[in-house]
Amino acid sequence: MATPQAIVSPSVLASNFGQLSAECKRMIKNGADWLHMGAPILSCVKKDVPEIFMDVHMMVADPLRWVDDIADAGGSLYCFHYEATDKPLEVIAKIKSRGMKAGIAISPATPSTVITDEIAEAADMLLVMTVQPVSELRARFPTKDIEVDGGVSPDTIGPCADAGSNVIVAGTALFRAQDPEGVIAGFKETVNKAQAKLAASRT
């Protein structure tokens, strides 16, 4: 059984928009794996940083409507909210038909049990906006990429990693860090140690 590896995805919303491409390149140089962003800035960044994995978080009411636009703009992963559609499997199928990975997010008030085995099997990544549901999802889906988004910093990475998150979205903690390379490396080390411990506990 494969152990999920640490992936760090800086949230571009915390960057200096006046130096957007340079900020993205700085994060890549310092060890970022993905870039986490919303739709409006995707095409701008993709032109200047074509090689990076674009992790697009869509907080929209009709996620199916925007799949083609995000694919055309260069998205690598399209993550939509479970609460925004009554046909999550249809949205996932559409995303994959456009050559992107599919992620599904749940808001803090939504129980993790809404992510059925069928949905989790179809999706490439699960995203939670708070740590609490992570351990429940990790217990059910030990090899799935699980992303946590919201207030992650060197002070909070431990609980996120221990709960089972392996994809870490962080904004201010990275873009305003004196040593972003060190912060990213620390995130990855903490996550990979936690994943190894979780994997050992399952054997």
Image: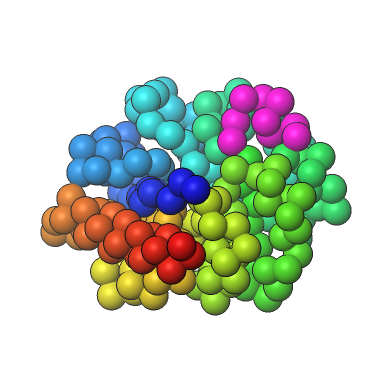
* Residue plotted at (60% across, 31% down): 100
Left or right of 13 in this view: 82: right
- Residue 130 on image: x %, y %: 53, 71
Q: Nearer the viewer, residue 199 or 83?
A: 199
Q: Is residue 5 magenta?
A: no
Q: Is residue 39 visible?
A: no
Left or right of 120 in this view: 87: right
Q: Is residue 137 visible?
A: yes
Query: Residue extending furthest right?
Result: 86
Q: Nearer the viewer, residue 163 or 187?
A: 163
- Residue 199 on image: x %, y %: 43, 60
- Residue 16 on image: x %, y %: 31, 49
Residue 97 appears in which quarter of the rendering? top right
Query: Residue extending furthest front?
Result: 203
Colouring of the image: rainbow
Q: How many marks?
A: 0
Q: Is residue 100 magenta?
A: yes
- Residue 124 on image: x %, y %: 59, 43
* Residue plotted at (69% across, 33% down): 95
* Residue plotted at (81% across, 40% down): 90
Which region shows up in magenta? 93-101
Q: Is the residue 82 above or below the residue 67 in the image?
A: below
Left or right of 134 in this view: 35: left
* Residue plotted at (49% across, 42% down): 55
